[in-house]
Amino acid sequence: MARLPKKLQQKLEERRADNTLRELPSETSLVDFSSNDYLGFSQNMALSHLALQILSDKELARNGATGSRLLTGNNILFDEVEELISTYHNAENALIFNSGYDANIGFFSSVPQRNDIVFFDEFIHASIRDGLKLGNARAFKFKHNNLEDLSSCIAQQKHQLDGGDNQAYLVTEAVFSMDGDTSDLHKLMEICESNDILLILDEAHAVGVFGKGGKGRISDLHLEDRVFARMITFGKALGCHGAAILGTNALKNYLVNFARSLIYTTALPPHSLASILAAYKLLSSDLGSQQIIKLRENIDYFKELLTGMRLSTYFIKSDSAIHCCILGGSTLVKQTALALSHQGMDVKPILYPTVPKGKERLRFCLHSFNSKQEIQEVLKTLKAIITKSPSLARGN
């Protein structure tokens, strides 16, 4: 077998020297404070049974999709699921992609055109950045959740948009995946509408967590008719796999024709679609409502304990299911995560280059199935570790 090229080996060695080398983790039996399974749907047997029943009722006994959606992979469940989720999220239409990454790659590489402008929050997801790199539009970042800096960026580029048919877009996240904080969507919408900018929102970590029935922040704020496009994913609170872009019929038609990540890949298999359909049925049921309530209660309880234990200064302010403890330094963060694991708690370290150097962190993900005792224990353990560490014990 051919050896790894020298340049690639050097890059690996640099990661190893910086203590930032990534490795695939093994499955554990630790208490889950790391997964995106916010409502516990991925382990819900009722959802699994319902998905199998849907396949049986539809007589879809196929293991694979057999081709792309434009060839042989567009089975009868696609229309049903897309109609259901567009209705549920109060959108004109929906288009399912194989993953959130595929959805963002397909959208941002094909929708913004040459000489168009995209303004993006500096903390947007890597998939959005990658999509922009593949496209032809000019992209300008603004400081995280800083509306003043955004307005300055818009003013600097205003001359590029006066006259002609060039379009400006703004993309941000409803809940930021590596910080857990949220954007001021009302003010962003006002800025967009006063400058003829189309707003695009990634709601991956908001669906199932915010809004009545877990419909997301756009629904919660009644902005559905004013946003250009929304990205939602099914691999987080809904506990299955895949993603969708919500928008107008015309936008869906455009993406079917020009989004390469949709056109040139095998479609989701029937079982994935049945799981999405089952997840939405569960989400809209009394059981789903109960799980959302439990999740919100756990989020509030976690925040109360942070204040009571004087840990708030270490954490980014968040009302979502994601809470990040900034420690700084890859070695320190990894050591702290390891110490937590020794006490039975699965909390993942987030390292550079996923986050900026000096902002390495522990990422706590809360769930409806976490008990109050588990939440107490993980924060008590964190408090003890911080207290014993001279480099961490600040303001306590």
Image (tube, grey):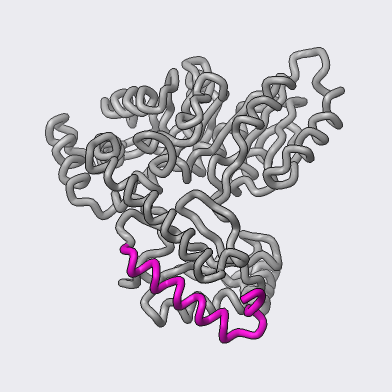
Q: Residue at x 59, y 72 (%)?
A: 21
Residue 376 sits inside the magenta stretch: yes
Identify which residue, 165 or 226, lies in the foreground. Answer: 226
Which quadrant of the view contains residue 330? bottom right
Q: With 35 as the anchor, is 19 left or right in this view? A: right
Q: Position of residue 333 (x, y in %)?
A: 58, 74
Which quadrant of the view contains residue 192? top right
Quadrant of the snapshot with the C terminus: bottom right
Q: Position of residue 381 (x, y in %)?
A: 45, 78
Residue 285 seen: yes
Q: Residue at x 69, y 39 (%)?
A: 120
Residue 9 seen: no
Q: Residue at x 43, y 54 (%)?
A: 300
Residue 31 position (above or below residue 244): below
Q: Position of residue 348 (x, y in %)?
A: 49, 67
Residue 225 position (above or below residue 81): above
Q: With 23 as the anchor, is 135 left or right in this view? A: right
Identify which residue, 271 or 380, lies in the foreground. Answer: 380
Q: Position of residue 30 (x, y in %)?
A: 34, 72
Q: Which residues, given as a range, are shown in magenta?
A: 371-396
Identify which residue, 215 or 233, lies in the foreground. Answer: 215
